[in-house]
Image (cartoon, helix red, strand yellow):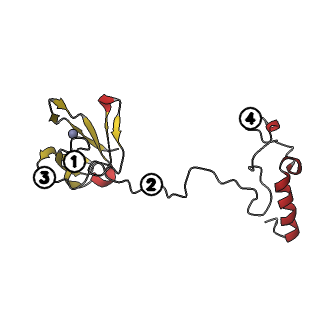
Amino acid sequence: MCDIIWCKKEINGKKCNTVNYLDPYCFWNWEGKVNCAECKTVYYIHMIQGFMYRGPKEVNEKPDTSPLYADKPLEGYRNYLPGIEGRTRPYQCLPRDIYLGVADMVKFSARGRPVRGWRPQPPSAGIAGSFGFEWDIQKLTPEVWEEYQQKLAKGEVSEW
Ligand SMILES: [Zn+2]
């Protein structure tokens, strides 16, 4: 859970109404100045154990840091994502670029035996079909069957 600064600064007769999210890891025990992502008003805050002890109080100084994320719930949640210079802080915990959200397709188990997860499965398998008791690898995926024969010949298949 994180605290927020709902910025009510009036600019040109209109309230800023931006919600700045103070993500808990960075602000849990923290004293300093943080900017509003929209109007860049700087607020002093002092948080102790995630509780807003003092502030937010508007100050006319440079911010120490920025919120991680901000949005405007009164305007259809228009938002500022992490990493916008001068507005939000970069998010350092993004997954490494090798994690693209695509599953690795595995043909063989650690013991060298064919697994069923290999695709594509023929349309006759139906939706999410798996050929429960009649997985005919030789017919369904002849290229995997061929590779399996080579593995057998090379002694790369084991019981344990
Ligand atoms: Zn603001």
Q: Nearer the viewer, residue 128 or 29?
A: 128
Q: Which residue is mark 3?
A: 61
Q: Earlier in the sequence, mark 4 or mark 3?
A: 3
Question: Under 8 Å from ligand 1: the CB of mark 3?
Answer: no
Q: Residue at x 32, y 44 (%)?
A: 2
**Which residue appears farthest toward the left when viewing the image?**
60
Which mark is first along the chain, 1 or 2?
A: 1
Image quadrant of ligand 1 equals top left
Residue at x-position 31% and y-position 52%: 89
Instruction: Find residue 126 and report its horizontal and vertical position in percent.
Output: 78, 35
SS for tag 3?
loop
The answer, for residue 40, to whether it is visible in the render is: yes
How far, Cα to Cα, is label 1 from label 4? Answer: 52 Å
Q: Earlier in the sequence, mark 3 or mark 2?
A: 3
Q: Which residue, given by chain and number where applicable, does mark 1 sit on?
A: 35
Q: Position of residue 83 (x, y in %)?
A: 35, 51
**Residue 54 in view of the camera:** no
What's the CA distance linking mark 3 and mark 2? 31 Å
**For marks 2 and 4 on the same chain, the one whose residue lies earlier in the sequence:** 2
Q: Are marks 4 and 3 in contact (CB under 8 Å)?
A: no
Q: Are marks 3 and 1 in contact (CB under 8 Å)?
A: no
**Residue highlighted by disc 4:** 127
Left or right relative to 89: residue 110: right
Dots 1, 4 in contact, CB < 8 A: no
The kind of residue on which mark 1 rests is Asn
Cβ–Cβ under 8 Å for marks 3 and 2: no
For marks 3 and 1, give the CA distance. Answer: 10 Å
Earlier sequence position, callout 1 versus callout 4: 1
Q: Secondary structure at mark 4?
A: loop
Residue sitting at x 88%, y 51%: 138
